Image (cartoon, rainbow, N blue to C red):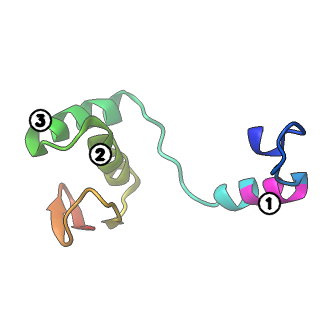
Amino acid sequence: MQATSSTRSDRVRHEIAARLIRTWGRFKVQDINLHIFERALILKAKTGFSYWDSTIVAAACALGCSKIYSEDLSHGQKVENLPDAL
């Protein structure tokens, strides 16, 4: 892990890095598979979102997320089957 490299003057201690990884492991992660890729391309064409924003929305839909917090979407905007995309 780059953050713990001994060559960094501001390196993170191993114990802290391990704790961060365990903490992040509690969150669901959606693999970018063919279904997500295809859905993102459809969303991009339909909404005009960038490919990356479309991929985030497609992944959120696949995970059953009820909200997305993003600086690129409008407050209260409805996207796909998500009740709120913020």
Q: Which residues are magenta?
A: 15-20
Q: Which mark is residue 53?
A: 2
Name the kind of residue labelled 1 in the image: Arg
Q: Position of residue 34 (x, y in %)?
A: 36, 27
Q: Quadrant of residue 47?
A: top left
* Residue 5 in the image: above or below residue 75: above
According to the image, label 1 marks what residue? 19
Q: Is residue 32 above or below residue 69?
A: above
In the image, 32 versus 14, the foreground residue is 14
Q: Earlier in the sequence, mark 1 or mark 2?
A: 1
**64 lies left or right of 14:** left
Q: Is residue 4 left or right of residue 85?
A: right
Q: Say which amino acid is labelled 2.
A: Asp
* Residue 72 to residue 42: above or below: below
Asked if residue 19 is among those painted magenta in the image, a careful observer would answer yes
Q: Is residue 34 left or right of residue 84?
A: right
Furthest toward the bottom, the residue is 76
Identify the secondary structure beneath mark 2. helix
**Label annotation for residue 60:** none
Q: Mark 3 — residue?
A: 45
Residue type, numbered disc 3:
Ala
What element does badge 1 sit on?
helix
Q: Position of residue 56 (x, y in %)?
A: 35, 47
SS state under label 3: helix
